Image (cartoon, rainbow, N blue to C red):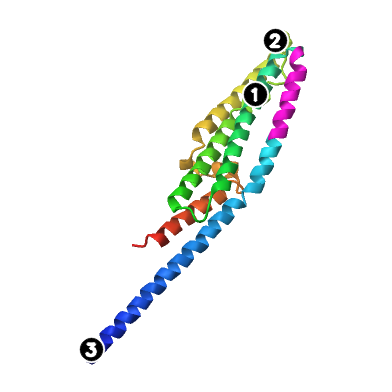
């Protein structure tokens, strides 16, 4: 009789323990989801600020292009035209990221949120890669076609070397700014912490939520 009672007590204790573990996992999952939402929401102000600054900057560039177009400086028009185009693309990507941030929900399935985080990661990498392509054009906008053939040869040699150096750097960054290089020093220096770190934290916390919801 005692053995049966002991088994029943043990079974009851085990059931209560399992219920408590499930309850704790659900609480941990809910708290982590709130943290994910908070981490991503904290990115919105800097994204909005960057977007507004980008719009003002592009408008400024376009005004310059329109007003100086009659002057017909080919170097200026091509350089600032490309810089303006690149920044317009960046504005579009930042607007896309703001949309992603606004639709993230703590009640959505983990897979759905993971897809949005993946979209943030990919778009952050792409916007940085694209912006790097403007580097060599910052070394040519001030040149004038009238200088060709009349300028100091030393000046042109230095100018060509600088432009080629920036072009090489732009291409190298465009190729190497990849998720696989995220732990390298130059990558961390380039991306800083306000834009990249929150995404990585959110991604890590989503992995924890998945573990809570699907324990082995």
* Mark nearer the viewer, 3 or 1: 3
What residue range appears in magenta? Answer: 55-70
Comparing 70 with 178, the one in front is 70
How would you rate the neighbour count of disc 1 (Cα within 10 Å): few for under 14, some for 14-19, many for 20 or more? many
206 magenta-colored:
no
* Marks 1/2: CA–CA distance: 18 Å
Residue 82 is situated, as x and y percent measured from the top left of the image, at 63, 23
Total numbered labels placed on residues in the image? 3
Quadrant in the rendering for residue 22: bottom left
Q: CA distance from mark 3 to mark 2?
A: 102 Å
Kind of element beneath mark 1:
helix
Tell me whether circle 3 and circle 1 mark residues in contact (CB < 8 Å).
no
Residues tagged 3 and 2 counted as in contact (Cβ below 8 A): no
Mark 3 or mark 2: which is in front? 3
Query: Where residue 137 is drawn, which disc sits there?
Result: 1
| Vertical relation: 178 (above or below) 141 | below
Left or right of 81 in this view: 203: left
State the residue position of label 2. Answer: 148
Point 63% across, 19% down: residue:
160
Identify the residue under disc 3: 3
Query: Residue 96, percent across and down?
Result: 57, 38
Q: Tell me the residue at 56%/50% (across/down).
A: 197
């Amino acid at each position: 009789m005692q053995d049966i009672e002991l088994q029943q007590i043990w079974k009851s204790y085990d059931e209560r323990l399992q219920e408590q573990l499930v309850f704790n996992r659900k609480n941990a999952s809910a708290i982590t989801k709130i943290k994910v939402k908070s981490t991503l929401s904290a990115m919105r102000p800097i994204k909005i600020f960057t977007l507004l600054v980008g719009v003002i900057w592009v408008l400024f560039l376009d005004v310059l292009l329109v007003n100086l177009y009659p002057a017909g400086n080919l170097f200026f028009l091509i350089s600032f035209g490309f810089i303006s185009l690149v920044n317009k693309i960046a504005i579009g990507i930042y607007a896309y990221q703001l949309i992603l941030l606004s639709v993230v929900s703590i009640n959505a399935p983990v897979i759905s949120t993971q897809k949005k985080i993946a979209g943030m990661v990919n778009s952050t990498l792409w916007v940085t890669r694209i912006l790097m392509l403007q580097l060599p054009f910052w070394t040519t906008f001030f040149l004038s076609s009238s200088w060709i053939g009349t300028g100091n040869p030393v000046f042109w040699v230095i100018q060509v070397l600088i432009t080629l150096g920036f072009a090489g750097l732009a291409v190298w960054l465009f190729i190497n700014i990849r998720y696989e290089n995220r732990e390298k020093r130059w990558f961390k220096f380039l991306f800083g912490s306000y834009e990249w770190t929150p995404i990585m934290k959110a991604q890590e916390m989503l992995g924890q939520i998945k573990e809570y919801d699907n324990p082995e």
